[in-house]
Amino acid sequence: MRSPLVGRWDGQFKNQYATGDYSLTVTSVDVDKATGTVRPGGNCPYCGKDIPFTGRVSKDGDVLTFNGVTPTTTAFQGELRRKGDDLVGWGQGAVKSDLTLHKVK
């Protein structure tokens, strides 16, 4: 059975400095392991580019914890909880941001 996390999720990030677009694509979920890409918006060297991540999925399949490294070697991580067709949680690269994403496909 295909995980409901697989697919593209688009939405917004918000932190104390900025608000902007954020996209996450989960390409695969194998038991509790996930892979995909994030594409943060904003004004940074890696913004607007797909950045690979690896992650873990909770036993109930509703929580994705992810991490990776940008091309400028900034580590990033986050945790998102699925609520129907939405993912809500946080992501952190240089700054911790609230994330709200909606499943696109």
Image (cartoon, rainbow, N blue to C red):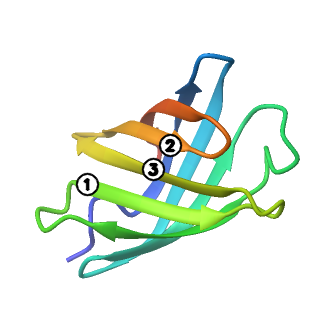
Q: Classify residue 4 as left or right of residue 24.
A: left
- Do the numbered discs 3 and 2 sit on residues whose CB atoms are within 8 Å? yes
- Do the numbered discs 1 and 2 sit on residues whose CB atoms are within 8 Å? no
Q: Is residue 9 above or below residue 28?
A: above
Q: Classify residue 59 as left or right of residue 70.
A: left
Q: Is residue 35 above or below residue 74?
A: below
Residue at mark 3: 78
Label 1 or label 2, whichever comes before in sequence order: 1
The Cα–Cα distance between marks 3 and 2, rounded to whole angstroms, is: 4 Å
Q: Amino acid at mark 2?
A: Gly
For the point 21% across and 54% down, the residue is: 62
Q: Classify residue 50 as left or right of residue 87.
A: right
| Tally of numbered discs | 3
Query: Residue 93: image x %, image y %?
Result: 63, 46
Q: Amino acid at mark 3?
A: Gly
Quarter of the picture holding the N terminus:
bottom left
Disc 2 packing (10 Å; few <14; some 14–19; many ≥20): many
The Cα–Cα distance between marks 3 and 1, rounded to whole angstroms, is: 10 Å
Q: In the displayed image of the protein, which residue is found farthest to the left? A: 60
Q: Which mark is residue 3?
A: none
**Nearer to me, 52 or 84:** 52
Q: Which mark is residue 63?
A: 1
Q: Amino acid at mark 1?
A: Val
Q: Secondary structure at mark 1?
A: strand
Q: Secondary structure at mark 3?
A: strand
Query: Residue 96: image x %, image y %?
Result: 54, 35
Label 3 or label 1, whichever comes before in sequence order: 1
Residue at mark 2: 91
Q: In the displayed image of the protein, which residue is found farthest to the bottom? A: 30
Q: Is residue 59 above or below residue 84?
A: below
Label 3 or label 2, whichever comes before in sequence order: 3
